[in-house]
């Protein structure tokens, strides 16, 4: 098994985020679909991009990369009814369907646990959910047993929270925060290595591939976190690649899981060894084998940031968006590329798609950290275009004021509640990194230009208040904690 598809309501946090991060940890590619974004919503986004719309339809017709399992996270009757509509309209194979019932005390009209030829799991707690999912995976008993070891330690160490703070967040602002995250990576890696030794397995063929992949993946993430924080890597990247190549050679005879291993190797070349040309050649090989929106995105990034060929980058961002229309990162970067080529109308349309994709999560106050960043920047970029290229000052003000609302709403977000004691820390880190003071000054300038005295005075007060109460603290906080010498670092991590 190497690929799954998970369909859920876009505003759901638990258990979808937990599940997606677990599958990615063990090397299973996850594609996402949403009950509240169907064909009509996708076509609306693609309406102003006919070349993307045609490519999207071609992909739909080819039915590329059929998943090994399709998961449907059911919260309410609306979710189930949408599943029925899709079942009637498309070729969903019930034998591959796994229904995860997260309705709680809410009573679903139809007893989904009685749907013939499918699997049903009632969500109670995270560990039992993973165990139940592993039980219905198409793999042998020994592989399931090893994977449950990974699941148990994943839950005990709350690794999804570590992923969010390590891989998907800003560099730590203090040495203590850095050590805390990196230590948790090391504890998890050591625990999985202990499981391997405990079983004494001579890995042959496909045996133990998921736990081996997870160890290598965690080493990569730990090193990536070190690089992000300008510290020496905890593990040798070339040794990680060596382990992956050994695992790859054992999988080739089975023709499964190969692309997943190759992708991790490629990310190590790209992110740790800083070999963009080698990474690109590997992405090129993967792109010919898969229909991965992420691979297309990375190829586009190569041409935009390294190859300096913006039209080539646009080509691959288009392929990424066509592969997964709800991929807001692809739309955002496509918009930035159109700004560079002077196609400002198309840039606005691309940024509008980012807003459209994330609007439901924004309204439900469940935006994830990366989503907050992309949504905020999409409004800021739209405001910049409206002012500088179309001279629509009122529209520019509206975009910028909405960006400010995104910043304000960070405090009310329900998403960070899953982070427990890190909730306030993560909120403040995001708010600090978005540099709201710059936006205040932009709105103040625009308000003066249109002669809106009241609005100008409002933002003049905000600027003055920020300067008086926060500037010294912000300057202090912005000083990197790692300006000191490397030998001051806690050497226990490297023992």
Image (tube, helix red, strand yellow):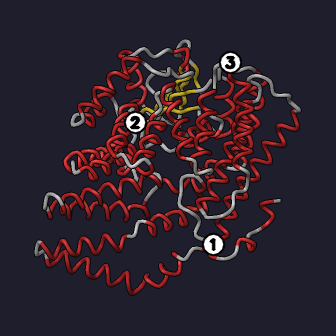
How far apart marks 1 and 2 lie (CA) works out to: 36 Å
Looking at the picture, how far across and down is residue 182, in whole percent? 69, 58
Question: Going 43% across and 82% down the picture, which residue do you hit?
Answer: 471
For numbered disc 3, what is the local secondary structure? helix
Q: Residues within 10 Å of mark 1 (few under 14, many from 20)?
A: some
Q: Nearer the viewer, residue 403 or 380?
A: 380
Question: What number is the disc on residue 254?
Answer: 3
Is residue 268 shown above or below 495? above
Q: In terms of sequence position, does the residue under pointer 1 or pointer 2 come before the other?
A: 2
* Residue 40 visible in the shown view: yes
Q: In terms of sequence position, does the residue under pointer 1 or pointer 3 come before the other?
A: 3
Residue holding disc 2 = 320
Quadrant of residue 469 in the image? bottom left
Question: Going 34% across and 44% down the picture, which residue do you hit?
Answer: 331
Is residue 149 shown above or below 423? above
Question: Going 44% across and 64% down the picture, which residue do you hit?
Answer: 411
Looking at the picture, how far across and down is residue 242, in whole percent? 73, 39
Q: Nearer the viewer, residue 195 or 263?
A: 263
How far apart marks 1 and 3 lie (CA) works out to: 46 Å
Which residue appears farthest toward the left when viewing the image? Answer: 451
Looking at the picture, how far across and down is residue 158, in whole percent? 67, 49
Residue holding disc 1 = 482
> Left of 488 or right of it: where is 174?
left
For numbered disc 2, what is the local secondary structure? helix
For numbered disc 1, what is the local secondary structure? helix
> Left of 271 or right of it: where is 467?
left
């Amino acid at each position: 098994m190497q690929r799954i598809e998970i369909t859920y309501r876009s505003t759901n946090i638990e258990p979808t985020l937990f599940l997606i991060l677990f599958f990615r940890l063990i090397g299973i590619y996850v594609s996402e679909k949403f009950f509240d974004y169907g064909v009509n919503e996708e076509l609306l986004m693609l309406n102003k991009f006919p070349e993307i719309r045609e490519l999207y339809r071609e992909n739909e017709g080819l039915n590329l990369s059929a998943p090994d399992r399709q998961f449907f996270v059911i919260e309410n009757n609306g979710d189930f009814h949408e599943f029925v509509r899709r079942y009637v309209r498309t070729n969903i194979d019930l034998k591959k369907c796994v229904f995860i019932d997260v309705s709680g005390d809410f009573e679903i009209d139809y007893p989904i646990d009685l749907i013939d030829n499918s699997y049903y799991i009632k969500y109670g707690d995270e560990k039992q959910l993973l165990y139940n999912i592993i039980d219905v995976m198409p793999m042998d008993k020994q592989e399931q047993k090893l994977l449950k070891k990974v699941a148990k330690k994943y839950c005990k160490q709350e690794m999804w929270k570590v992923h969010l703070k390590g891989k998907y967040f800003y560099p730590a602002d203090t040495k203590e925060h850095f050590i805390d995250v990196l230590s948790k990576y090391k504890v998890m890696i050591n625990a999985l290595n202990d499981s391997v030794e405990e079983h004494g397995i001579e890995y042959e063929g496909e045996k133990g591939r998921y736990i081996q992949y997870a160890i290598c993946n965690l080493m990569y993430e730990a090193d990536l976190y070190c690089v992000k924080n300008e510290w020496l890597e905890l593990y040798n990247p070339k040794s990680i690649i060596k382990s992956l190549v050994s695992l790859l050679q054992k999988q080739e005879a089975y023709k499964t899981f190969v692309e997943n291993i190759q992708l991790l190797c490629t990310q190590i070349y790209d992110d740790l060894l800083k070999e963009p040309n080698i990474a690109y050649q590997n992405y090129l090989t993967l792109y010919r084998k898969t229909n991965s929106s992420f691979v297309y995105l990375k190829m586009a990034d190569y041409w935009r940031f390294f190859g300096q060929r913006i039209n080539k980058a646009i080509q691959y961002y288009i392929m990424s968006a066509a592969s997964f229309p709800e991929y807001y990162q692809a739309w955002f970067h496509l918009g930035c590329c159109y700004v560079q080529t002077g196609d400002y109308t198309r840039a606005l349309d691309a940024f509008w798609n980012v807003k459209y994709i994330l609007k439901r999560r924004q309204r439900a106050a469940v935006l994830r950290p990366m989503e907050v960043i992309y949504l905020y920047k999409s409004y800021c970029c739209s405001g910049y275009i409206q002012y500088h290229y179309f001279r629509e000052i009122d529209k520019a003000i509206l975009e910028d004021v909405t960006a400010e609302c995104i910043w304000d709403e960070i405090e009310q977000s329900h998403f960070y509640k899953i982070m427990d004691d890190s909730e306030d820390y993560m909120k403040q880190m995001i708010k600090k990194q978005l540099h709201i003071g710059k936006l205040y000054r932009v709105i103040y300038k625009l308000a003066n230009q249109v002669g809106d005295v009241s609005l100008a005075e409002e933002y003049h007060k905000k600027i003055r208040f920020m300067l008086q109460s926060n500037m010294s603290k912000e300057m202090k906080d912005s000083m990197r904690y790692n300006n000191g010498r490397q030998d001051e670092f806690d050497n226990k991590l490297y023992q």
